[in-house]
Image (cartoon, helix red, strand yellow):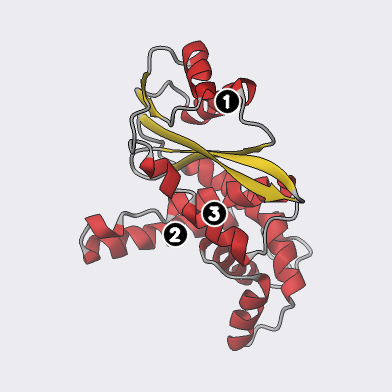
Amino acid sequence: MNTPNNLYKRCRFPSEVIQHAVGLYYRFNLSHRDIEDLLAERGIVVSYEAVRLWCNKFGSRYAKRLKRRHQGFGDTFFIDEVFMKIQRKQQYLWRAVDQDGEVIDVFLQPRRDGATAKRFFKRLLRNHRSEPRKIVTDKLRSYGAAHRELIPAAIHATSQYANNRAELSHQSTRVRARGMRRFKSPLQAQCFLSVHAAVHNLFNLGRNLISAKHYRLLRQRAFTSWKCAATL
């Protein structure tokens, strides 16, 4: 069934089904087979392979639209890197979040030297469109080199435990990697994590900080934003 939207041209299933399946995959720790079963419960017979193709084809497009509509990040960057084994090779996942837990960027690289840190900082400045007031990192010297060269005016904090926010932000990535039985390639990991970050930001509503009524209102707005990103 084709839809008026060229984005879904030649798709056999309605756009609403595709949007729902892709949203489930990137928001929750579900496999393609799990989503196949959830759709089957609603009378929608689709193979898990079709769900995989939808996620690969439409996920990055939705993420780009979500990023364009994003309201912006805070002025404090918490930056950290963790190692990941992909195809038996050690990779480093660099991640930056702001003071509200919004993911500014994720960047998978084979090294964590000064040159890589500078590339990551340049990506952050492009996404943020201005220099941060403060950055918080661990004591890795690569951060210091990038800070001195690219954003020397920003405060650079490296005290113990100050960077816990960035370190804890890796937990959801670890959970998804285990559920997917590890990432199959660096390209697949980068593509997935970029979309996952955009969806996380959309539904990062601070539930423990606001009333239930306010949370439901923000959640409904997030659903509307997702629908707009997937249909325009």
Farthest residue, direction left: 211
Q: Which amino acid type is shown beneath numbered disc 3?
A: Thr
Give the x, y percent position of residue 51: 70, 69
Q: Residues within 10 Å of mark 1 (few under 14, many from 20)?
A: many
Q: Which amino acid type is shown beneath numbered disc 2?
A: Thr
Residue 4 lies, with reference to residue 201, above or below; the image says: below
Q: Which mark is residue 173?
A: 3
Q: Which mark is residue 224?
A: 2
Query: Looking at the image, can residue 1 be seen?
Result: no
Q: Spatial distance from mark 3 to mark 2, Cα to Cα?
A: 25 Å
Q: Spatial distance from mark 2 to mark 1, Cα to Cα?
A: 36 Å
Q: Earlier in the sequence, mark 3 or mark 2?
A: 3
Report the quarter where the N terminus lies.
Answer: bottom right
* Nearer the camera: disc 2 or disc 1: 1
Residue occupying the point 69% across, 65% down: 3
Residue that badge 1 annotates: 117
Residue 33 lies, with reference to residue 152, above or below; the image says: below
Query: Is 34 or 71 nearer to us in this picture?
Result: 34
Q: Residues within 10 Å of mark 2 (few under 14, many from 20)?
A: few
